[in-house]
Amino acid sequence: MTGLPAPMPSKFVLTFFAGAAAGALGAILVSRFLPGPEAMRAELLARPEFLADHPEILERVRGVLLSRKLAAEGSQRIELMRGKWRFLTHAAFTPTIGPADSPRVLLEFTDYTCSPCRASAPAVRDAVAASKDLRMAVLLYPTGGALSEYAARIALAAYRQDPERFAALHTRLMEQGTALTQESILGALRDLSFDVDQIERESQSDETRRYLKQVRLFSEELEISGVPAFVLNDKLVVGGVSARQLKELLGAGNPAGPSGAVLTGSAMASQLVPPSNNSVPE
């Protein structure tokens, strides 16, 4: 016959009740002596010298505010890239280097006459080539005057003529050792067997003008005021970059680029036309 379970030793019972009592007492003391958010706010407003005497608290607060600001800005960037400006970052509309069906899209706002852009170009080229799941949308954003705009117009027209040869032209214009001139730009086109006459005509088209305007407006909405600038999902890096910085940026970005089927040729252009309303200026 099974007997009744043996009673718990009295020392265990006492330990259990002592622990429970201590926990309850602690909760009462915390609620009694630690103020709630409103009371704490009122106390700090009444005694601002406390924060002045403890600057380490202000440093922690700055860190929290910066983190919240960056998170909000990152979310806004993603919303803009996947919504209003999604069409502009597609290979059908902007010069692209890398596989068109890549799940990750690195945006580079750049200018062929910009010294930091040119200094960063070898590291950018190597990083993109080493990332097989990445494509780079080269958003041409001329900021350096007439030659800067001329180079951007020519590069865009060349991409539209032959996307496969654009990467070689882009590297040539960015990485040539001598200063960029109109003659060297046209020389690069001839060396790479582009149709120079057709490109020069296309570079002056309304479509080219509209593209440059849209890139400028897109950069303004992303709060990018200079070049180079790199955007990957919610991450933004402004200014010249090193190989290490690019590695960190590409390592931080998850494969969560703009969604949608991969399109080619006329189907790609027809399904990704800009909205006809006023949300995207012509």
Image (cartoon, grey):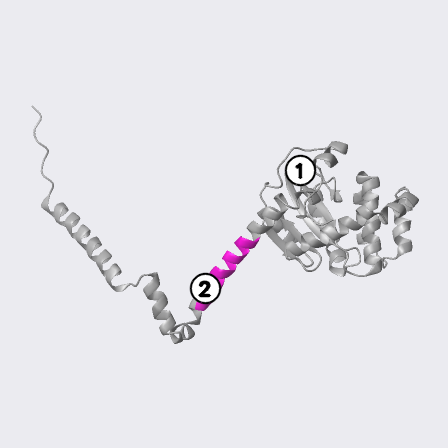
Q: Of 119 and 67, which appears nearest the observer?
A: 67
Looking at the image, is 85 positioned above or below residue 38? Answer: above
The amino acid beneath tag 1 is Ser
Q: Position of residue 68 (x, y in %)?
A: 50, 56
Residue 188, image x, y percentages: 88, 48
Q: Which residue is mark 1?
A: 102
Give the residue at x 35% y 68%.
42
Residue at 71% x, 39% y is 273
Q: Position of residue 88 (x, y in %)?
A: 70, 45
Q: Quadrant of residue 120 in the image?
A: bottom right
On the picture, is 101 further left or further right than 235?
Answer: right
**Quadrant for the N terminus in the image:** top left
State how many labels appear.
2
Structural crowding at the residue carrying mark 2, measured as other residues with C-alpha within 10 Å and reported as few (<14), some (14–19) or many (≥20): few
Query: Residue 213, can we see it?
Result: yes
The chief SS type of the magenta part is helix
Apparent side of residue 214 relative to residue 7 in the rendered image (left or right): right
Amino acid type at circle 2 is Val
Which residues are drawn in magenta?
Answer: 58-73
Residue drawn at the location 42% of the way across and 67% of the way down = 57
Is residue 258 found inside the magenta-colored segment of the image? no
Disc 2 target residue: 61
Q: In the image, residue 33 lies at what x, y percent?
A: 25, 64
Determine crowd level at label 1: few under 14, some 14-19, many 20+ residues with C-alpha closer than 10 A.
some
Q: Secondary structure at mark 2?
A: helix
